[in-house]
């Protein structure tokens, strides 16, 4: 039976949800090119938001009401749409029933979570159901982890075309990114720290480099993410820990597993931030590393967690429109072959706008439209952006979401 909607955006009243709604309206109109609706738990708030972004067209965009606590309402919502696109977070608090409903109904799903223990739980509980129903459940469709997961996918595609084989190691280095943070993101991080306090086994999941790989399947030789300052002889700069590596690396490794380990069993992936060369580079890398440890410690203890909550934006708040407009990101990836390390390729992934909000809202919206409209060949299951959408998503991100994927250097080192 044909569903009423292509996409329901659930959480349209939140800080990020409003940005996704604005983008969908500007890009796809009020039902002409995409049959979409906004959803949430509070009708009055949804009506007000709709008026803000759609003006005279507001009445053309339907509203669906469902609270995360009401399983029956969620079942009704998912039966009406091809795709649920959700910004209702923290996902570990409000997202589980929606994943359950989509997996059972065969409705495709995308979100913005970076909560690894929750994704682990969703995979454990719903992988078999989603495989059976055909639902594509895709987590991490924002800045974590689309540029990283799709960046590795793109690099491997170009590597194979240029050198005839896949790279066995990929090093991802964040060149720069600038933007802000929202209350919902802070709340999601704080909630995860609280869960770790309540259940120490969650720490084991967080520190497992292969936490999201299918269970009882091969893993690999990657170890823990970088914690200190390390000199990178390929990039000729000092590097520091990257704040989202704990999410992105797990997603990239799951992508590899779900694609049948096509890059080889010895495939390795690492992520860090470039900090510059010389003594200044070393100092900067050390300061970033020290700051990362302090942030984790501050989040781990009740009193400092309360303080962080007080100084951070509240749920519903986030960076200014100027910060969102002026933000950007630039990430480079270097791939090398184990058989011949001289065969290498460097690619770059860039985006306009604040990565966490301006760019993320476009990435999530295009993911939802891709799941709804494109002729994807992936089977159902709890997937990753690369394993679910591959080239289709790269095209959309380049055409509609202000992102670029390009080869910086594809020569073998002997050619130089
Ligand atoms: N991966 C990334 O790059 C990235 C970037 C941005 C955000 N995020 C994540 O996205 C999530 C949202 O962030 P945000 O800053 O937009 O949060 P937010 O402003 O606090 O918005 C949360 C949304 O959830 C809704 N909600 C809360 N409880 C609900 C319930 N019981 N039933 C139905 N809806 C409910 C809220 O509705 P009301 O208006 O009715 O309260 C609101 O629409 C967070 O988990 C954050 O970590 C990730």
Image: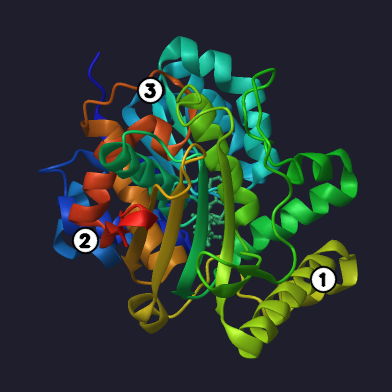
Q: Quadrant of residue 326?
A: bottom left
Q: Is residue 162 visible?
A: yes
Q: CA distance from mark 1 to mark 2?
A: 41 Å
Mark earlier in primary sequence (1, 2): 2
The verdict on label 3 being within 8 Å of ligand 1 is no
Residue 4: x percent and y percent? 24, 28
In this rendering, the answer to whether 137 lies above or below 176 is above
Residues 363 and 78: in front is 363
Residue 120: x percent and y percent? 67, 33
Furthest residue in direction bottom, as rendered: 280
Quickly name the residue at label 1. Answer: 298
Quickly name the residue at label 3. Answer: 79
Q: Kindly indicate whether the residue at mark 3 contacts the one at mark 2 (C-beta within 8 angstroms).
A: no
The verdict on label 1 being within 8 Å of ligand 1 is no
Residue 351: x percent and y percent? 33, 65
Decide if residue 350 is on the left or right side of residue 331.
left
For the point 88% across and 65% down, the residue is 302
Quickly name the residue at label 2. Answer: 54
Query: Which is more foreground, mark 1 or mark 3?
Result: 1
Around disc 2, counting alpha carbons within 10 Å, would you say few (fewer than 14), some (14 to 19), or many (20 or more)? some
Q: CA distance from mark 1 to mark 3?
A: 43 Å
Element under disc 3: helix
Q: Quadrant of residue 181?
A: bottom right
Residues 156 and 363: in front is 156
In this rendering, the answer to whether 106 lies above or below 279 is above
Q: CA distance from mark 2 to mark 3?
A: 25 Å
- Residue 121 is tagged as none
């Amino acid at each position: 039976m044909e569903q009423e909607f292509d996409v329901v955006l659930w959480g349209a009243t939140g800080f990020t949800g409003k940005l996704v709604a604005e983008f969908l309206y500007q890009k796809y109109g009020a039902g002409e090119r995409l049959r979409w609706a906004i959803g949430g738990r509070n009708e009055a708030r949804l009506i007000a938001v709709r008026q803000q972004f759609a003006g005279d067209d507001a009445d053309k965009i339907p509203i669906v009401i469902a609270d995360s606590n009401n399983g029956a309402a969620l079942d009704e919502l998912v039966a009406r749409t091809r795709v649920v696109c959700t910004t209702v977070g923290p996902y570990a608090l409000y997202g589980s029933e929606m994943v359950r409903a989509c997996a059972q109904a065969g409705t495709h799903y995308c979100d913005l979570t970076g909560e690894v223990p929750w994704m682990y739980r969703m995979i454990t509980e719903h992988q078999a159901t989603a495989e059976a129903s055909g639902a594509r459940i895709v987590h991490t469709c924002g800045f974590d982890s689309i540029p990283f997961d799709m960046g590795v996918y793109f690099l491997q595609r170009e590597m194979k075309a240029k050198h005839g084989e896949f790279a066995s190691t990929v090093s991802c280095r964040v060149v720069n990114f600038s933007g802000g943070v929202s209350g919902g993101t802070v709340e999601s991080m704080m909630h995860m720290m609280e869960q770790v306090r309540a259940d120490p086994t969650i720490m084991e999941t967080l520190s497992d480099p292969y936490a999201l790989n299918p269970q009882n399947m091969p893993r690999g030789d990657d170890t823990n993410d970088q914690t200190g300052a390390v000199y990178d002889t390929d990039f000729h700069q000092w590097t520091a820990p990257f704040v989202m590596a704990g999410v992105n690396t797990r997603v990239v490794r799951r992508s590899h597993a779900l694609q049948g380990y096509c890059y080889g069993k010895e495939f390795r992936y690492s992520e860090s931030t470039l900090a510059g060369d010389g003594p200044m580079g070393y100092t900067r890398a050390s300061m970033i590393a020290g700051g990362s440890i302090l942030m984790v410690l501050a989040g781990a203890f009740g009193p400092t967690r309360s303080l962080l909550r007080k100084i951070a934006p509240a749920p519903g708040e986030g960076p200014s429109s100027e910060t969102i407009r002026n933000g950007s990101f630039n990430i480079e990836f270097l791939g090398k072959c184990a058989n011949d390390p001289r065969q290498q390729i460097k690619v770059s992934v860039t985006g306009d706008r604040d990565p966490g909000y301006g760019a993320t809202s476009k990435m999530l919206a295009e993911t939802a439209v891709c799941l709804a409209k494109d002729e994807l060949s992936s089977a159902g299951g709890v997937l990753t952006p690369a394993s679910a959408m591959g080239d289709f998503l790269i095209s959309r991100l380049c055409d509609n979401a202000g992102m670029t994927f390009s080869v910086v250097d594809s020569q073998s080192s002997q050619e130089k």
